[in-house]
Amino acid sequence: LMHDPETIYLVLAAAAVGMVVLASRLDVPYPILLLVGGLLMSFVPGMPTVEIEPDVVLVLLLPPLLYSGAFLTPMREFRANLRPIGLLSVVVVLLTTAMVALVGHYVLGLSWPVAFVLGAVVSPTDPVAFEAVAQRLSAPRRLTSIVQGESLINDGMALAIYASAVTAVTVGTVTATDVASRLLIGIVGGIALGLAVGWLLNQLRRRVDSAPEELAISLLAPYAAYIPAEHLGVSGVLAAVAIGFYHGRQQHLSTSAATRIRALSFWEMLVFLINAGLFIVVGLQLPGILEGLAGSDERDLFLAAAMVIAVVIGARVLWVGGFTFFLRRLRSPRPWAQPLPRSYAVVISASGMRGSVSLAAALAIPLQVESGSPFPERELLIFLAFAVIVVTLVPQGLALPKLLERLGLQGDEVVDQEEAKARHAAARAASKRLEELRDEDWVEDDLADRLERLYAFRQQRFGLRRDGNDTSEVDEQVERRRRLRRELLDAERGELNRLRDSGRVDGDVLRRIERDLDLEDSRLMS
């Protein structure tokens, strides 16, 4: 029965749901529990090896993850932190690739091109575990922006190096100039193509007025940038990131409010499902990886994995710590030379988890080179990538919550104050507009008076919060109003259910009214 594909998928889906629920109860980032759960399930007797096609990850699943991450990244924070993001996403990738390649060549005996393939495979970071922890603990926005921004860019850098290194192995003769020119063309071309496709799709989006059609365009967007970019020989990863940034910046001009509400829920669920599926399937790869290394000396494999893992972690700590120390000694007043707080440097050093991109890149290594001979040490590279993923994700991911708490990096008051400032300004603008409209024939005095009191109360509430004053009395008022409104909503739902049960209201009518009530309820909850 377990060899039936439908049964396997059902078991995996049920296991994933159970592990996500358990992760929430244990207060553990769900990617870690899914990976560990996949590892344990892979040893269950009768559990078949679940094959994962590299193209499924790189072409089908990676583009929407990149697009969503870039779309939701605030451009202001990204620009403000561009220097640390650039130094992490470019320099750390290059440093990690080079150091791993050195160990691969001089210690493990790999040829230079194969060693650089290994370095590129283990270079890109995966922020999913960090994001889960940061969201729960309300980590500082700047810290979160740096880690998320780094991951968006370093995937493109690492995969561009990876493509050049794989070409060097398969073809046999590639010069350093060829590699540098391919990298430059891939980066610039990928970004340019992503922006161009983003502009074209925005023109199309402005000509449709249906939420499902706009959602379909947003789902198409990452593939419309990624796939042509890969066929043209430029970075599909950076193309997907670029179009995500562009659409995130333009969404308020090109999409309706109804579409934005639906799109946020749609993308949140899609990204969660993709990540959950990827991490549990990554864990299930172990038997197939070990099978490919049958006959190898276990001690040698362990030592090789330990050395590569130490270099991957050490390169990140070395660069982040060294650069922070250098800027502190420099003591320059220039903005670019302002060092990160020591607590940020510690967390960033510990946030270099690897994930599905590294495994997909390893599995995508060709079986043969151009001459027809097997790709050198392919099974070893896949095993080392898997070892790096497990060791960087599980221990570091489990340590992150305690690390953030110990360093006092939880509860971002700056974000709270900025939100209060924005809400206060919005309420003030609404009050001003209300005064301008009072004399219009269609504005009723009673309604205008009620709205005037509402917006005056909002200005009072968010003004106190903006200025850091005590809001307990106002918050109690808000909670009483919220409780009363929810009681009334429950009464409306109860009556609708009675009407449905008695057959006095149509199902479509009921769903439309319930949707309005649900939107109001969700607004009260937020």
Image (tube, grey):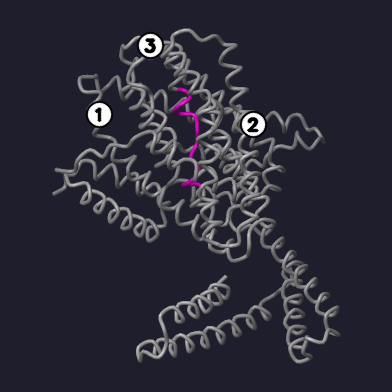
Q: How would you rate the neighbour count of disc 2 (Cα within 10 Å): few for under 14, some for 14-19, many for 20 or more?
A: some
Name the mark on residue 290.
1
Which mark is first along the chain, 2 or 3?
A: 2
CA–CA distance in space, label 3 to label 2: 30 Å
Expressed as whole percent of the image width and height from the top left, the position of residue 403 reads: 52, 47
Quadrant of the frame with the C terminus = bottom right
**Element under disc 3:** loop
Corner quadrant of residue 346: top right
Residue underneath mark 3? 109
Residue situated in front as seen by the camera: 451 or 193: 193
| Number of numbered discs | 3
Residue beneath the point at 52% across and 19% down? 98
The amino acid marked with disc number 2 is: Leu
**359 to the left or right of 312:** left
**Element under disc 2:** helix
Which mark is first along the chain, 1 or 2?
A: 2
Whether residue 498 is situated above or below residue 268 in the rendered picture: below
Instruction: Please say whether residue 397 is one of the residues in the magenta stretch.
Output: no
CA–CA distance in space, label 2 to label 1: 36 Å
Residue beneath the point at 51% across and 30% down? 230
Q: Which residues are magenta?
A: 119-130
Residue underneath mark 2? 87
